[in-house]
Amino acid sequence: MRFMEFCGGHTVTIFRYGIRQVLPPAIEMVSGPGCPVCVTANADLDKAIALAQIPDVIIATFGDMLKVPGSYSSLQKMKADGADVRVVYSTMDALNLAETTPDKSVIFLGIGFETTAPTIAVSILQAEEKGIDNYYVLSLHKLCPPVIRAILDSGEVKLDGLVCPGHVSAIIGSHPWEFITRDYGIPCVISGFEPLDILQCVDMLVAQVENGESRVEIAYRRGVRPEGNQQALRLMEQVFQPCPAQWRGMGEVADSGLKLREEYRRYDAELAFDIDISQSCEPAGCICGDILRGVKTPADCRLFGNACTPEYPVGPCMVSSEGSCSAYYHYGGDFGG
Amino acid sequence: MCLAIPALIKLIEDKEADVEIGGISRRISLWLTPEAKVGDYVLVHTGYAINVLDQEEAEETLTLLREIAVMDEEEG
């Protein structure tokens, strides 16, 4: 039986606690594309890096993005060269930064899935409420269900079950996963992030497979309700609308991104600033794209552990703490890889 | 990146709250969980409460986890 854990947070738990080793050999776990930093396309990273070079711009970003290499540079290198790049914990910090530095433009890098997008929607609504006009968002958000459909439609990976992301589901609920059980006959279980949560989830998936069932079950019942968080969904819907998005390794996936709605376009960094980027390119030899689709593992990469390490990452899956390459590097990936 | 951790709400002021996470106090936003009350556990993601934890479900899961831990020790 082959189960995919979509979420990078689950990948980390599985590796950190050696879950692949304790599962019977008949159960194979493969990692999916659930790491927002990892799936951000180089062309989008290049936009962020280009924005950092504009005078009087402060880039506010979650820390994971700093070291991710784009086609020619990274935010960390830009910062070393004098660009004003600040790591923030929350969009609230970015908004405070805009409020206290009115002579600069603060651009928040909007990276993340459905878990994070509502928090960015709130920051835009608060900017409007407080009349903060020097706050912008580069909206690179991604939506999870459409990319799962793209992976299943590609037919590259045969799956017997899906470990659905816990905190994405805290927002969207369990219903948006039902197409996987209905259209593809694949069992789905929404899991928490403790090692025993994962084992419980695997147990529930095995039970469904053995009984010939395919339905969406919530193992992470303390954090996820079937209807999700309606308030968060409302605010996300108010500020954003779906759009096509570029995914590393998967190319463009319809309706898998979020862009600002017409009435909030003045906060859109892509429209407010001239972004001048050259032709984007991928690092030679990097197979992050294949790893994100679950068709290869870091062990298949000739750069892994040699040319590409957490100190000197070539691809994003080595940079992000939730990337498969980082998990393999830190916890050892030879078991069940 | 979708990391979220449980925190106990100690004080609410307008749409913000002071929560305790592992003994440390922090201000968070309640924009996404207007129903949250003092004494609730919320899941906090990048400074925002994204859900109020279901206390009964949490206790049921914790009991289950404790039972498994006891079984482990007995078998251990």
Image (spheres, coloured by chain):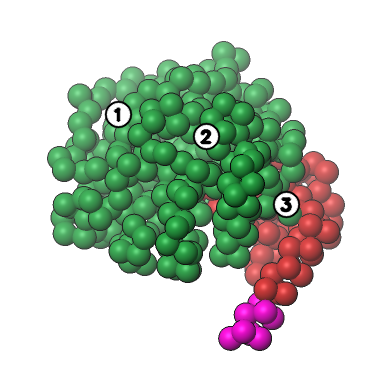
Chain colours: A green, B red
**Near-viewer residue (A294 or A249):** A294
Q: Position of residue A293 (x, y in %)?
A: 37, 39
Left or right: where A221 falls relative to A266: right
The magenta stretch is B69-76
**Residue indicated by mark 1:** A43
Residue A189 in view of the camera: no
Residue at 26% from the left image edge and 38% from the top image edge: A70
The disc, 1 or 3, on the residue closer to the chain's N-terminal end is 1
Residue at 67% from the left image edge and 73% from the top image edge: B68
| Vertical position of residue A35 compared to residue A125: above or below | below
**Residue indicated by mark 2:** A144
Q: Nearer the viewer, mark 1 or mark 2?
A: 2
Q: Are marks 1 and 2 in contact (CB under 8 Å)?
A: no
User: Mark 2 vs mark 3: same chain?
Assistant: yes
Name the chain letter of the residue that bears numbered label 1: A
Secondary element type, mark 1: helix
Name the chain letter of the residue that bears numbered label 2: A
User: Mark 1 vs mark 2: same chain?
Assistant: yes
**Residue indicated by mark 3:** A221
The disc, 2 or 3, on the residue closer to the chain's N-terminal end is 2
- Between the C-alphas of marks 1 and 3, the distance is 38 Å
Residue A261 in view of the camera: yes
Secondary element type, mark 3: loop
Residue B70 within the magenta-colored segment of the rendering: yes
- Between the C-alphas of marks 2 and 3, the distance is 20 Å
Q: How many marks?
A: 3
> In which quadrant of the rendered view does residue A92 lie?
top right
Give the residue type that dot 2 points to: Cys
